[in-house]
Image (tube, rainbow, N blue to C red):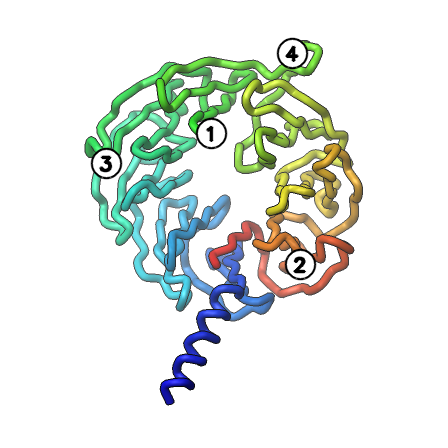
């Protein structure tokens, strides 16, 4: 009996080590579809307005932020809601830091610090819509959209503000690259960069290799593809992607595309990237070879491709086709369609295990 139990335990451990589980946003229904080993196994319901919803995983639990302020803790092992709270009316983004969760809000104009059991630990009043919330331990960094500032808080000092930095006009998204907080602006070209070791700030305009300035409105940073020290940035209202050296913010190459790009997703081994489109080309995806940053394949993949994500091993591409009501799975070598799974109006794709 003991041997049987040990073998069973090993098999269960082996299964959970290699099984891949996805949560797929059902945008119109406020639910998450649960996909495991390429099969629909259930739904997590009534999570709020899931337009632009984000799911992030921390160990055995995932957290989902809804646009109308609901914040939900989910057990990845059972796919059950552990707790659902509404700390604000309009949630924008969140991050984990230490044993806490920090949430940026448009409304109320605050940043909320929750425990991982979703109890409110602290509220930071900003009198601004808040965006670009990131963690660089022991610092929590976010941007104040209406005050043209970046605030830096120290978690070791009870989330007290240790630095306020004046930046460009209307910051609206940011990313952490190594020890730098890079912020984009809605009303100004270029980006701002905060050195998180010294708190020094500088502003950089995008320039091409011949130093002629490029007029480029920065899209949301979650749409960028990051390859080592390069970023592949989808251009706004242009059929292009820019390959940018993140250290210097110089444009190294321009990739010509079939349509207006939305998301650029980089494979785990960083040999290819995939881009989807808006407008009249939203049924297409293009594959970019990252050795020379050139498009090697463009093909129709579904009616309004909303989101794209590689499997953890890079062998498959998951794709949400909004008007087909399908999650589609493609082989990343042959680009053949492997499987379609019915999911009502799917959008965001999140790997939780």
Cα distance in 3D space between marks 4 and 1: 21 Å
Give left or right: position of 230 versus 98.
right
| Residue assigned mark 1 | 174
Residue nearest the observer in this picture, 178 or 32: 178
Cα distance in 3D space between marks 1 and 2: 30 Å
Dot 4 or dot 3, earlier in sequence: 3
| Residue assigned mark 4 | 213
Residue nearest the observer in this picture, 11 or 131: 11
Q: Position of residue 60 (x, y in %)?
A: 38, 59
Q: Position of residue 206 (x, y in %)?
A: 60, 17
Residue nearest the observer in this picture, 211 or 234: 211
Looking at the rendered structure, the secondary structure element under dot 2 is strand
Cα distance in 3D space between marks 4 and 3: 41 Å
Looking at the rendered structure, the secondary structure element under dot 4 is loop
Looking at the rendered structure, the secondary structure element under dot 3 is strand
| Residue assigned mark 3 | 123
Residue nearest the observer in this picture, 346 or 13: 13
Cα distance in 3D space between marks 2 and 3: 41 Å
Give left or right: position of 3 versus 119.
right
Cα distance in 3D space between marks 4 and 2: 40 Å
| Residue assigned mark 2 | 328
Dot 1 or dot 3, earlier in sequence: 3
Q: Position of residue 133 (x, y in %)?
A: 39, 33
Up-down relation of residue 218 to residue 135 (above or below) = above
Up-down relation of residue 350 to residue 105 (above or below) = below
Cα distance in 3D space between marks 1 and 3: 21 Å
In percent of the image, x 31 and y 44: which residue is there? 101
Give left or right: position of 193 versus 260.
left
In percent of the image, x 54 and y 66: which residue is there? 36
In percent of the image, x 44 and y 25: which residue is there? 180
């Amino acid at each position: 009996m003991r041997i049987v139990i040990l073998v069973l335990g090993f098999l269960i451990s082996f299964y959970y080590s290699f099984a891949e589980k996805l949560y797929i946003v059902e945008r119109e229904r406020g639910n998450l579809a649960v996909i495991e080993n390429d099969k629909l196994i259930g739904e997590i319901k009534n999570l709020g307005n899931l337009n632009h919803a984000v799911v992030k995983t921390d160990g055995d639990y995932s957290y989902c932020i809804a646009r109308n302020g609901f914040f939900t803790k989910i057990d990845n092992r059972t796919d059950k809601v552990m707790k659902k709270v509404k700390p604000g009316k309009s949630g924008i983004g969140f991050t984990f830091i230490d044993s806490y969760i920090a949430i940026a809000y448009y409304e109320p104009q605050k940043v909320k610090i929750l425990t991982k059991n979703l109890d409110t630990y602290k509220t930071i009043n900003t009198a601004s819509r808040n965006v670009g919330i990131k963690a660089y331990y022991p610092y929590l960094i976010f941007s104040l959209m209406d005050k043209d500032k970046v605030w830096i808080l120290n978690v070791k000092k009870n989330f007290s503000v240790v630095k306020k930095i004046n930046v460009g006009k209307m910051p609206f998204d940011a990313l952490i690259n190594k020890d730098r907080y890079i912020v984009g602006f809605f009303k100004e070209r270029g980006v701002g960069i905060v050195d998180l070791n010294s708190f020094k700030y500088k502003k950089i305009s995008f320039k091409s290799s011949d130093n002629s300035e490029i007029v480029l409105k920065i899209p949301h940073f979650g749409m960028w593809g990051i390859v080592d020290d390069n970023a592949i940035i989808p251009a706004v209202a242009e059929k292009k992607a820019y390959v940018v050296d993140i250290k210097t913010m110089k444009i190294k190459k321009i990739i010509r595309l079939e349509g207006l790009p939305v998301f650029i997703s980089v494979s785990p081994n960083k040999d290819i990237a995939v881009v989807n489109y808006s407008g009249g080309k939203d049924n297409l995806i293009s594959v970019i070879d990252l050795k020379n940053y050139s498009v090697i394949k463009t093909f129709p993949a579904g009616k309004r491709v909303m989101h794209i994500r590689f499997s953890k091993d890079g062998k498959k591409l998951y794709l949400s086709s909004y008007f087909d009501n399908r999650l589609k799975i493609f082989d990343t070598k042959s680009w053949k369609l492997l499987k379609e799974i019915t999911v009502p109006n799917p959008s965001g794709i999140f790997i939780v295990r």
